[in-house]
Image (cartoon, rainbow, N blue to C red):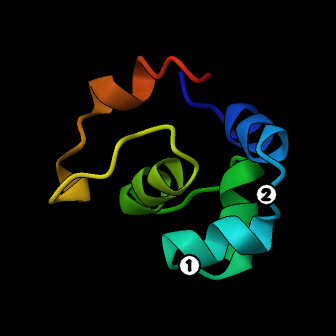
């Protein structure tokens, strides 16, 4: 299951800064920080950050990722 701790662990294991992930996902660093802190963000932010970290494969429509794909994430 993708949790804030999982996202942070994956990011750190890959040697990425919050700023690098934010740039790749297309968000401000504060948005990624809020996600890692477990604060409320839009669903699409979670999907885009997971794609930026390589947790989810990018698709033609990243908004089409299902809740099941995020819950069953093997990286976490």
Horizontally, residue 53 falls left or right of residue 64, namely right
Q: With respect to residue 69, does 64 lie above or below?
A: below
Q: Work out whether 30 lies above or below 66.
A: below
Residue 65, percent across and down?
A: 24, 42
Q: Left or right: where does residue 45 sit relative to residue 40?
A: left
> Residue at left 22%, top 52%?
59
Q: Which residue is mark 2?
A: 16
Badge 1 marks a residue whose secondary structure is: loop
Q: Which residue is mark 1?
A: 27
Name the residue rendered at 25%, 56% in the picture.
62
Q: Is residue 36 above or below residue 24?
A: above
Choose top left, top right, bottom left or bottom right for residue 8.
top right
Q: Quadrant of residue 7?
A: top right
> Picture coordinates of residue 10 (x, y %)?
72, 37
Q: Along the line of sight, which residue is nearer the eye, 55 or 67?
A: 55
Q: Is residue 40 left or right of residue 17?
A: left
Answer with mark 2 or mark 1, whichever residue precedes in sequence: 2
Q: Residue furthest front?
A: 14
On residue 45, the disc is: none
Residue 26: give x, y in percent of width and height. 50, 79
Please identify the quadrant where the C terminus is shown: top right
Measured from the top left, where is residue 28 in percent x and y? 64, 82
Disc 2 element: loop
Mark toward the viewer: 2 or 1: 2
The image quarter containing residue 5 is top right
């Amino acid at each position: 299951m993708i949790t804030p701790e999982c996202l942070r662990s994956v990011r750190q294991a890959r040697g990425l800064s919050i700023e690098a992930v934010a740039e790749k996902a297309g968000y401000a660093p504060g948005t990624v920080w809020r996600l890692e802190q477990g604060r409320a963000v839009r669903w699409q932010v979670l999907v885009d950050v997971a794609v930026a970290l390589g947790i989810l494969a990018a698709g033609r429509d990243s908004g089409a990722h299902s809740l099941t794909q995020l819950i069953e994430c093997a990286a976490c």
